[in-house]
Every structure is written in C-alpha cells, then in structure tokens.
Image (tube, grey):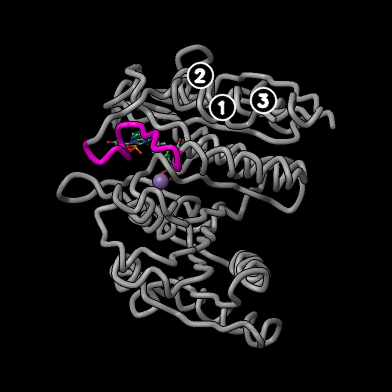
Amino acid sequence: MDAKIVLLPGDGIGPEIIDEGERVLIAVAERFGHQFEFQRCPKGGNAIDSHGTPLPDETLEACRAADAILLGAVGGPKWDDPNAKTRPEAGLLALRKELQLFANLRPIKPHRQLIDASPLKREILEGTDILFLRELTGGIYFGGSGVKEHPSGEEAYSIMTYNTEEVARIVRLAAKSAQLRRNKVTSVDKANVLEVSRLWRRVAAQVMAEEFPDVEYEVVLVDAMAMHLISRPRDFDVVVTGNMFGDILTDEGSMLPGSLGMLPSASLGVSGPGLYEPIHGSAPDIAGKGLANPLATILAAGMALQHSLGLSDEAAAIDAAVESVLEAGHRTADIAAGGEAISTAEMGDLVVAALQP
Ligand code: NAD
Ligand code: IPM
Ligand code: MN
C-alpha cells in the first residue's frame, strides 16, 4: 500500500516522540512491504514563531491531503502569555474543527507488565479495559467566548453548547463500539446542574433506547465518575462524554496504565484523514532530555494503521512489539517505578528491533 502520512512534531517533547513514531512506521512499512511517504509540517508554538500562526495554511492543506496525521504535542511556557494574540493550542482546536474530527477514541487498558507502575492497587486495576469516546468538536471548547467590562474590572465567559446532532452521533458511535466489545455504554454528564447536560442526557437516552435497545446503558455524573474511574475501573466498557469532561477524565485515567506517556488516541470524522496523537502534552519539564516515553505516540501510530489505513495486522504487530519490549522489562523513567530507565530513543530502538521478522 502507498500512504501519505503527515507528521506534526509540534513543541516540547513532540519532535522527540514523533521521531520514534516515524521510525516505527518505517519499520512496519519495510516488514510488510508498504510505501509510506512522510511529510513534516510546522504546527503549534514553532509555527507561531515561523509563520505567525499555530496552523499555517500549508499545514492544513497537507493534512487534508494526507491519509493519516500523527501529532506530537503543542504548547509550552514560551507561548503561555495570557495576553498573547494566539496560542499553540488554538491551532490544534482549529485542525480538529476543520477536519470535523468529532470522535476522540482514548483506550485505557493497563498493560499487565506495568501494574506496579500505577499508583493504584493490582486488585483494582486487573481486568480494566475502557474505551473513552470524547466528543471533540463541540462543547465549551467551541461555544464562543469573550471578555467584557465589569464593575470590578472585567468578566470573561466561555459557553458550553451541544446540539441534538452532535450528541446523537457520538453516542451512536459509542454504542456501535460497545457492540464490538462488552456491550455497555456509560454516558457521563453534569445534568444535575447544566442545561447542556440535560439535553445531552435526553438525546443519549433516546438514541440508546430507539437504536440500541440491546446495549446496556447507564448515566453517571462527572464528579462521581472521577471517583469511580479509580475505585472500580473494571466496571466500565465504553464511556462517552463531552469535550472538557473527556479531556479531564482521561488524564486521570492515565494513572491506570501508570503514565500519560502510555495513552494513545485517535480523532476521527465522518470521512477524510484521522488525527493520531498521544493524549499528553508537550511536557516542557522534560523536553530535550531524552526522558519522554514514546510509547503513547508509537501506539497512536498503530491506531493510525488500524483506523485510517485499514492495516489491522500491521497495527497488531506494533502492539505486540510494545508488549514484548515491556515484557522484557524495559522502561522509560515515567514507568520505571524507581528502577532502571532507558531513553526515548532507546525505547524506540527496542520497538523497532521487536518489529523485525
Ligand atoms: P503534559 O501532558 O505536557 O505533562 C504533564 C506531566 O506528565 C509532566 O510532568 C510531564 O513531564 C509528564 N509527561 C507527559 N507526557 C510524558 C511522556 N510521554 N513521557 C513521560 N512523561 C510525560 O501537561 P502540561 O504540563 O499541563 O502541559 C504542557 C503543555 O502541553 C501545555 O502548553 C498544554 O497546553 C499542552 N498540551 C498539549 C496537548 C496536545 O498537543 N495534544 C495535550 C495536553 C497538553
Ligand atoms: C488534549 C489537550 C488539548 C485539549 C489542548 C492542548 C487543546 O489537552 O488533547 O487532551 O484540551 O483537547
Ligand atoms: Mn488533555
């Protein structure tokens, strides 16, 4: 197969982890006889510096023309001035919106080799296998915002909106995903307080009852979900929720596999390329030191093969290579639990080696 893959290294640890993701994809192409063409484009803070905007037109056009997009991370202290006229993160939101990537899949399945890397107890973790479906192009991220005068100075607002169609399509995808798994959907909202969550809950209930009567369905309030996620994670199969709740709960969920550096994600739309990225950020505290765990990015590359290129065997080969490297005891610092740690590039080397036939 010939495929065009756009790489958006971004900022902070982004370039370090994207290097490893690319090497793993090259190893897959060699082993399975594919031609992957890679194109690196500026995006995020580095693009603000070079082009004055976090999502240059050429980058967006390259992404539109790609089969899949692999992103490192964007942002960092250099671009954090609250008075700045644009931010690296705005470019990421614009890319998601432009490509209509409404569904963000964030699987959380602790690797059995890493149970001791998690702050949670083994008996809580064992058997956990959750697929978070985070709505990605609506909610408070896109409902409009502003700042106005106020007697005390100023008042700022960010509006959370959801419409029927936005809720229905993500809930539908959650139910279809559940049918291929353990047949259970948990919808997370804040319907005891927010009008927007009451619409979410009505629409979700209707879709589930009318279209998926055989799929087990429950609703949980987001504050309680934050607790259930670490007290009884095994009980959840597919969890569907809005943009901001999903953002927060999945960073919390990264403590189940033990590190943010272990969690990949796929952002999918109706058609067109998917965007694949680790769920973590640019980790400015460890950037440039070779300390970053590249496995979330490598696993995200596997999700790209699976979801955008339809290469299931190749995706499984990446997962198996990661498993075998963990099985052999190799750890970056974030998952070493105080033991011996290897560098970003060494971890990449080992996964590439494990992919050799
Ligand atoms: P972060 O996710 O970058 O880091 C949180 C903590 O996790 C840090 O201690 C970091 O060192 C650690 N960490 C993250 N990824 C790791 C990895 N692969 N290996 C080892 N340790 C890892 O969150 P933050 O510090 O709050 O945010 C930093 C910047 O990243 C901000 O500008 C934020 O907006 C941005 N961000 C970007 C994305 C994205 O591009 N998708 C996602 C989240 C945050
Ligand atoms: C993520 C990040 C982004 C988000 C930021 C960087 C815009 O935290 O991908 O989880 O909030 O969606
Ligand atoms: Mn996040």
Of residues 336 and 257, which is closer to you in this image? Answer: 336
The residue that disc 2 covers is 47
Label 3 residue SS: helix
The residue that disc 1 covers is 55
Label 2 residue SS: helix
Of residues 133 and 309, which is closer to you in this image? Answer: 309
- Relative placement, left or right, of 22 versus 156 is right
Q: CA distance from mark 2 to mark 1?
A: 7 Å
The magenta stretch is 326-338
Looking at marks 2 and 3 on the same chain, the residue that comes earlier in the sequence is marked by: 3
Residue located 66% across and 70% down the image: 172
Q: Position of residue 284 (x, y in %)?
A: 31, 26
Q: Answer few, some or many: residues within 10 Å of disc 2's Cα (few below 14, many 20 plus, some between 14 and 19).
A: many
Q: Main secondary structure of the magenta part?
A: loop
Q: Answer few, some or many: residues within 10 Å of disc 1's Cα (few below 14, many 20 plus, some between 14 and 19).
A: many
296 falls in the magenta region: no
Residue located 64% across and 66% down the image: 177
Q: Position of residue 131 (x, y in %)?
A: 53, 61
The quadrant of the rendering that contains the N terminus is top right
The residue that disc 3 covers is 27
Q: Position of residue 279 (x, y in %)?
A: 45, 43
Of residues 115 and 142, which is closer to you in this image? Answer: 115
